[in-house]
Image (tube, rainbow, N blue to C red):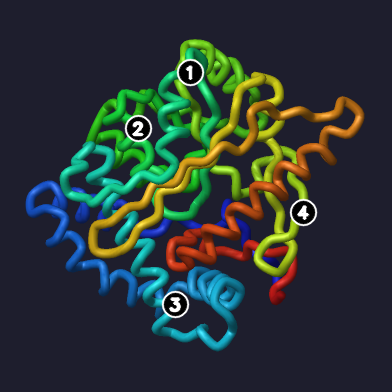
Amino acid sequence: MKRQGWLEVAEAGGTLGIRFFVVVSTMFGRSVARAFLPFVALYYTLFHKTARRGSAEWIRRARGPEHVSRRAIYTHILRFAQVTVDRLFFVRRQMWRFDIRQHGEQWFKEIRSSDRGVIILGAHLGSFEAMWARAAVDSLPVNILGYFGNARMINNALRQLDSRWAGNLIEITPGRVDFVLEVKDRIDRGEHVAILGDRAGLGGDSVEVDFMGGRALFPTGVYVLAATLRCPVYLFLAVHTPPNRYDIYCEPFAEKITLPRKARLEGAQQYAQQYARRLEHYGRAYPDNWFNFYDFWSEKKP
């Protein structure tokens, strides 16, 4: 059977479904919107084979094979649905709805005091929008660099909710590298650029590293970019605990990324392995916040 990567997984939900949650969340608030999510999660648990298989594989690695069950998969998918709906409120910067707790305050202060921008390294673990909204409240300009083609509908909905969201997006177009100039311009202006570093597959180089008891591919582009721009890299993750708590973790990743000229891929692999180790740490601490519902590992079982 051909392994299905994240670029082949269709955007979860259709246009009508996304519009429904936008309307409900706008008119009736977060509690009413979340009331529909158990039914959505049940549907995907029963009928979305790729999501079910990806969840089961993660639970097996993060918690042990004895914890794999339909109930555990349902809970995992429900957490993803909850965080996805919360994105609608974070983009509108309605922080009062949530219990936000920051960890690593000294690193937040260090970033705020910097004259030059930094690269913020995240993952599909928890909520990236929670970090973005918290940064906006703290007057930290954070731009998001990524490929949005596989989530076009939800991102269009977020743009409509707040035009400032669109202004903070830098899109990667396969086959083009002009986005690097835009990133450099924003870094030089003292703005920050956030990148999710856990999904390979857009044509750039990737390396295989140890992760959660197996081997998995991680992209190297973020390390090449940081080495080119000569800017610090910080790891940021915002994880969700129901009903309304988000813990935002910040820690330094590298003051300066250095890649040997004759062994750039090998050098990038060391940073990718460092990133995978930190991702594993947070993934085990918050196993229901892992949101890569596809064939992530190079082999199926640890």
Asked whether disc 3 touches disc 1, contact meaning CB atoms under 8 Å apart, the reply is no
- Disc 3 or 1, which lies upstream in sequence? 3
- Disc 2 or 4, which lies upstream in sequence? 2
Mark 2 or mark 1, whichever is nearer to me: 1
For residue 41, above or below residue 105:
below
Q: Residues within 10 Å of mark 3 (few under 14, many from 20)?
A: many
Instruction: Report, in whole angstroms, how far the alpha carbon at label 4 lies from the one at label 1.
Output: 34 Å
For label 1, the residue is 114
Instruction: Report, in whole angstroms, how far the alpha carbon at label 2 lies from the one at label 4.
Output: 32 Å
In the rendered view of the protein, which quadrant contains the C terminus? bottom right
Specify the quadrant of the image occupied by residue 137: top left
Q: Position of residue 125 (x, y in %)?
A: 48, 54
Identify the amino acid type marked 1.
Ser
Specify the quadrant of the image occupied by residue 38: bottom left
Identify the amino acid type marked 3.
Ile
Identify the amino acid type marked 4.
Glu
For label 4, the residue is 208
For label 3, the residue is 73
Q: Residue at x 34, y 69 (%)?
A: 78
Specify the quadrant of the image occupied by residue 85: bottom left
- Disc 4 or 1, which lies upstream in sequence? 1
Mark 1, secondary structure of its residue: loop
Q: Position of residue 206 (x, y in %)?
A: 74, 45
Residue 24 located left or right of residue 204: left
Q: Residue at x 21, y 54 (%)?
A: 21
Mark 2, secondary structure of its residue: helix
- Disc 3 or 4, which lies upstream in sequence? 3
Residue 135: numbered disc = 2
Q: Position of residue 195 (x, y in %)?
A: 53, 37
